[in-house]
Amino acid sequence: MTDSNTHTQPSGVRLWIAGARPRTLPAAVVPVAVGAAVAVGQSPDTAWWRAGAALVVSLALQIGVNYANDYSDGVRGTDGGERVGPLRLVGSGLAGPTAVKRAAMIAFGVAAVAGAVLALVVGPELLVVGVLSMLAGWTYTGGPRPYGYLGLGEVFVFVFFGVVATVGTTYVLIERIDGLSVLVSVSVGLWATALLVVNNLRDIPGDTGAGKRTLAVRLGARNTRIVFVLMQYAAFGTAIVANWTSGRATAAAILGMPFAISAMRSVERGAEGPDLIPVLGATGRAQLVSGLAMAIGLGLTG
């Protein structure tokens, strides 16, 4: 099996960087940036180093989930055959299952250490959130009944890379749950989930053959396209509502709308298979630009 984007496979450090799927990392950066921006101006003695630690936790969890997903899908044989999309280490045979599993555990370990430091200064409740996050990350495609195979992957992404990561970052900075953080976490979660929806739309043929009942497989291509478009509208709509109710410039998120519009047009026109790879890129850029613009808007009006 080869990566659809290249005939030359990476090796060494580049192989493991590719396996970590760096293009997914904005999903870890955006919620921390937005959550930290919500905290701006709310506490004069905020310890901002905590935002850095939260970013380490978020990035390490994202990388750990990527490696864990690679390992679990690989040993199940889900990645067998010709694959459209990013390189899979186990499925391609370029790395052994044990090595990929070890990489996932190392990433989760980094997240655990950084999370433990935050728990020492904030409170033990963070340990509970951390354990749940890692457990959810592993059982997404791992364990006897992976929920990613049951069409619940989007729920995981929305909850943990949207609500938990955004609200959690604000919480470690001001040590309370903030209503604005909860509201903007909806936009953050929808942008992150939209990436998974496009990914699963692209993979419907392969996932169907492998018995992987993702939400896209369950809904079918037509309804999945509708869900994707509605998610984008809901994300930007929530940002505008948050701007109106809070008086802070969360509507700056519309700077990323041109990328979202490009992605939506391609999806509505019926792009499929390899043609959805550029759509993933546009969706990722919409997430990154919108999220960072929202964070800047929040920071400037905090």
Image (cartoon, rainbow, N blue to C red):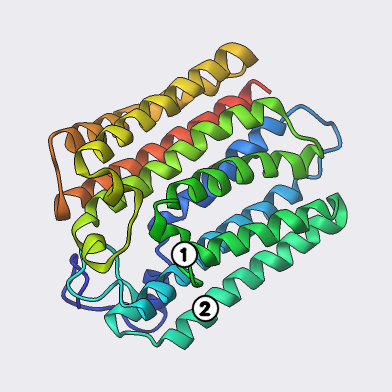
From the viewer's perspective, tell me whether residue 275 is left or right of residue 256.
left
**Where does the image place residue 69, in percent across and percent down from the top left?**
43, 68
Q: Residues within 10 Å of mark 1 (few under 14, many from 20)?
A: some
Name the residue: 33% across, 73% down.
88
Quadrant hosting residue 179: top right
**Residue beneath label 1, please?**
146
User: Percent from the top left, x then y, of residue 187?
Assistant: 49, 32
Disc 2 crowd rating (10 Å Cα; few below 14, some 14-19, many 20+) is many
Q: Compared to 86, does 124 lie above or below?
A: above
* Rendered-image quadrant of the N terminus: bottom left
State the SS at label 2: helix
Left/right of residue 263 with respect to residue 156 in the rendered view: left
Residue 103, numbered label: 2
Identify the element where label 1 is drawn.
loop
Q: Is residue 260 left or right of residue 288?
A: left
At x 72% / y 63%, what residue is drawn? 114
Quote the CA–CA distance across marks 1 and 2. Answer: 20 Å
